[in-house]
Amino acid sequence: MYNEKAQMMELDEIRKVQEEKMMDIVEYAYENVPMYKEKFDEAGITPDDINGLEDVHKIPFTTKDDLRDHYPYGILAVPRDEIIRFHASSGTTGKPTVVSYTRKDMETWNDLMARCYSAAGVEPGDIVQNAYGYGLFTGGLGFHQGAEALGASILPTSTGNTKKQIQMMYDFQTTVLSCTPSYAIYLSEAAEKYGYDPLEDFNLEVGMFGAEPWSEEARESIEESMGLRAHDVYGMSELYGPGVAVECPEQNGLHVWSDEFLVETINPATGEVLEEGEEGELVITMLSREAMPLLRYRTKDISVVNYEKCECGREHPRIMGVTGRSDDMLIVGGVNVFPSQIEAALLETEGIAEHYQIIVDRDVLDKLSIRAEVDKDYYESDEYDEKELLKRAKENLTAILNIKAEVELLEPGELPRTVGKAQRVVDQREEQDRMEET
Ligand code: DLL
């Protein structure tokens, strides 16, 4: 069972609920989490200063470092024995960020995930193959519980074991696939390799893809090759996991379940709150998290929030896709480069596949190199012209980058494939600097 009706709340009602819940959660965090008492004291405020949504900007931010500093149990607002689940996200450096859930938190999360499936058009009785990783990562169990709460039939295949995965997709006539978009691309290639034609042999209708950035071009490619409608799902471990926002069949922005999440956008450099419709870092307050309330959590994800009513009738505001991360931005020779821009330019180049790697290294000066695979069909066709393709790829990249980039074309299948989130950026500069120092 889940709160199906909450999907259709009107904006006025959402704002009313947000206001009530925000005042309660501020009080709750202040009373139960010493870190928040300290933060409020430092800012010279108390919960009495927060009297409505317009006061939200007075509340101090919370960052990932705040969580890391409280490893392993985090910033618990309840006694440890009330926690019924931990998850963790592995950082590239240092300790993982641990997140915890009470029974009530689990119910909320399951409800949010069931809403995501429902908003994407998934119904009780659908056969959901869940190929997100099960374990400390929130993807596997999050999608699993959501499908169960909705009343769908779940096939918990987890990641990997690709051949078996394909076999089951055929045998069970799976209707819904949940996994990272990079694994969806891998699965479509693998299906062909094992002799299946997904359009003929499979019964897929809906894809629930998220956990990493992916472009419109990647969406088209997955939809065409797998014969499904691909929905973007956004979330992060600190905010329960997946289930913060999802695309409806309009595929025009991701509805944030705003009776549970209060979203703001800020200028990542100054912390200044931006006007509606301006692009910036998403800052999110969880409105009813019991185990570890997070007030104004800095996600580092860059997006725009759209408050217009959607064609689907839902009034939960939409984030218009995550266009990058404020900490993913590469500074190459002083120029800001977003990996998402590179992906868009590559995929706009007909004949280039979705598999690429961005390498930054330093040879006196910073150097940006891009290794991209050629599309298999194009590679095998008579029209394949390496020189001409290279020229077009370079032109498209130069049009968006203010810096010269080396481009290398690779044969189809040359880059390693991933079952989870793709590692597309290899920044070798720190390692090179360290080597030089020794
Ligand atoms: O990736 C939770 C999740 C699982 C979301 C499955 C969706 C589907 P973390 O491992 O903590 O949690 O990583 C969170 O991944 O801050 C974004 O930078 C990125 N991310 C997640 N969803 C999307 C998306 C899960 N739809 C971080 N588009 C976030 C772009 C995404 N980036």
Image (cartoon, helix red, strand yellow):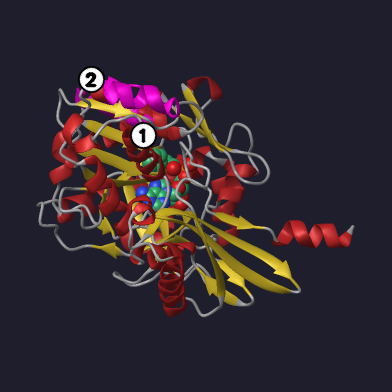
Looking at this rendering, what residue extends furthest in the right direction?
438
Q: Is the magenta stretch mostly helix, strand or loop?
A: helix
Q: Where is residue 58 in the image (x, y as percent from the top left)?
A: 45, 63
Q: What stretch is highlighted in magenta?
A: 142-169
The quarter of the picture where the N terminus appears is top left
Position of residue 226 in the picture relative to residue 428 (left or right): left
Label 2: state its secondary structure: loop
Position of residue 33 in the picture relative to residue 375 (left or right): right
Disc sitting over residue 386 in the figure: none
Name the residue that disc number 1 marks.
193
Label 1: state its secondary structure: helix
Q: Which residue is at the front of the view, 296 or 171?
A: 171
Query: Which residue shows up at 68% across the image and 64% down it?
Result: 361
Q: Is residue 143 magenta?
A: yes
Instruction: Give amino acid for label 1.
Output: Lys
Which dot, 1 or 2, sits closer to the camera?
1
Q: Position of residue 362 (x, y in %)?
A: 71, 68
The quarter of the picture where the C terminus appears is bottom right
The image quadrant that residue 187 belongs to is: top left
Q: Position of residue 159 (x, y in %)?
A: 43, 29
Position of residue 255 in the picture relative to residue 368 (left or right): left
Sooner in the amino-acid sequence: mark 1 or mark 2: 2
Query: Which residue shows up at 53% across the image and 48% down it?
Result: 423
* Other residues around mark 1 within 10 Å, as few (<14) / some (14–19) / many (≥20): few
Q: Is residue 105 visible?
A: no
Instruction: Give amino acid for label 2.
Output: Phe
Name the residue that disc number 2 marks.
172
Q: Where is residue 303 in the image (x, y as percent from the top left)?
A: 37, 62
Q: Does the magenta stretch include residue 156?
A: yes
